[in-house]
Amino acid sequence: MAYGSGAPSWSRGRDNSSNVNNRFNGSSSYQAGGGIGGNTTTDYIPPMVSRTYADQQTHVIEDSMKTLYEVENTAGTVQNQLFTQRQQLQGTSRNVNEMRDATERSRREIAELISKRDKKRYQLLMIVGTYFNF
């Protein structure tokens, strides 16, 4: 199909204008100028429906309610999962805080032990230095 040729690529050279399945027969559509402001009789063919409008609307509402219940169920499931994850995150946060506190206590104890070691080393050096100087 060349651009602007007016023939769709799926028609493969056939003229399907007589086989077009639309709601208007002939040229009495609103697009062709008939029906509105001119000829008031149109050959409009309404779509074929197997149910009445009320039945269709009842089906739509039932389907909407079914969807609503599914959404509420899904929302409840998601809410429960989020609550569980919140509990896990809070527990993890407590564990991290306890670990930080333990690390800080260990750091202080190690600093005290190093300080005590240095004092004892200095005392030993003083004792050895005074013993050999006499």
Image: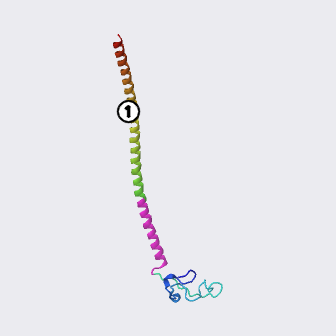
Residue 113 is drawn in which quadrant?
top left
Image spot of residue 91 (x, y percent):
39, 44
Residue 75 placement, left or right of 8: left
Of the pair 86 and 101, the residue shown nearer to us:
101
Residue 29 placement, left or right of 85: right
Of the pair 23 and 21, the residue shown nearer to us:
21
Q: Secondary structure at mark 1?
A: helix
Image spot of residue 97 (x, y percent):
41, 39
The prevailing secondary structure element of the residues shown in magenta is helix
Question: Which residue is rendered at x = 36% and y = 15% of the image?
Answer: 129
At label 1, counting other C-alpha atoms closer than 10 Å, the crowd grade (few under 14, some 14-19, many 20 or more) is few
Residue farthest top in this picture: 134
Question: Bounds of the magenta span?
Answer: 50-74
Question: Which residue is rendered at x = 38% and y = 23% of the image?
Answer: 118
Residue 102 magenta-drawn?
A: no
Of the pair 58 and 35, the residue shown nearer to us:
35
Q: At label 1, which amino acid type do we have?
A: Ser
Q: Is residue 134 above or below residue 105?
A: above
Residue 99 is drawn in which quadrant?
top left
Disc 1 designates what residue?
Answer: 106
Q: Is residue 42 above or below residue 107?
A: below
